Amino acid sequence: MDGKDPFGYAIEQYLWVIGIACAGGIVKHLNNTKKVRVTKFVVDVLTAGFTGVLTFWFCEAFNINGPLSAIMIATGGLMGNRAWKEFENFWRIRLGMPMRRSTDASESTNEVEQ
């Protein structure tokens, strides 16, 4: 990890990152809902975009480039809030802290919003 500046990337690169991540968020939303609600859709897409940017920075920090980086960014967007829990557990392990167990029933992959 060489400590790259997050503000040193071209705007076009961020547009690609956010676009790929948001596409993952749209897929997640469409797969998990029977009835499309605008507010839930917007939240899913915004969460996906932000998660995609953090995943991009993660990939850059660990020198993961090219198609693998794009796959991880799209997967981060698809995971949305679940990706945050993975990021948290990653850093907990790095800092020698115990992983946190999820007790939120809404994270079930089989749950479909009605």
Image (cartoon, rainbow, N blue to C red):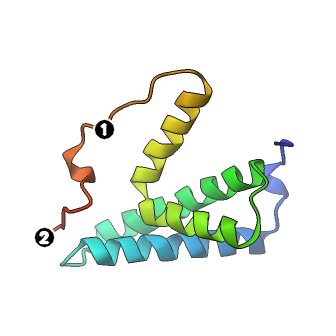
Name which residue lies at 76% across and 75% down: 12
Up-down: is 32 above or below 79?
below
Asked where in the image residue 29 lies, by quadrant, the reply is: bottom left
Helix, strand, or loop for circle 2?
loop
Residue 90 point in image, percent of width and height? 55, 38
Residue 112 point in image, percent of width and height? 18, 67
Count neighbours of disc 2 (C-alpha within 10 A) and say few if under 14, some if 14 to 19, many if 20 or more. few
Up-down: is 29 above or below 98?
below
Taking depth in this image into account, of 30 and 108 the one nearest to the observer is 108
Residue designated by label 2: 114
Asked where in the image residue 74 lies, by quadrant, the reply is: bottom right
Residue 93 point in image, percent of width and height? 55, 29
Count neighbours of disc 1 (C-alpha within 10 A) and say few if under 14, some if 14 to 19, many if 20 or more. few
Residue designated by label 1: 102
Up-down: is 21 above or below 99?
below
Up-down: is 48 above or below 54?
below
| Left or right position of 102 against 90 | left
Front of the two marks 1 and 2: 1
Q: Which of pointers 1 and 2 lies earlier in the amino acid sequence?
A: 1
Name which residue lies at 31% across and 78% down: 30
The C terminus is located in which quarter?
Answer: bottom left
Helix, strand, or loop for circle 1?
loop
Asked where in the image residue 41 lies, by quadrant, the reply is: bottom left
Q: Are marks 1 and 2 in contact (CB under 8 Å)?
A: no
| Left or right position of 100 against 33 | right
**Amino acid bearing label 1:** Ser
**Amino acid bearing label 2:** Gln
Name which residue lies at 61% across and 29% down: 94
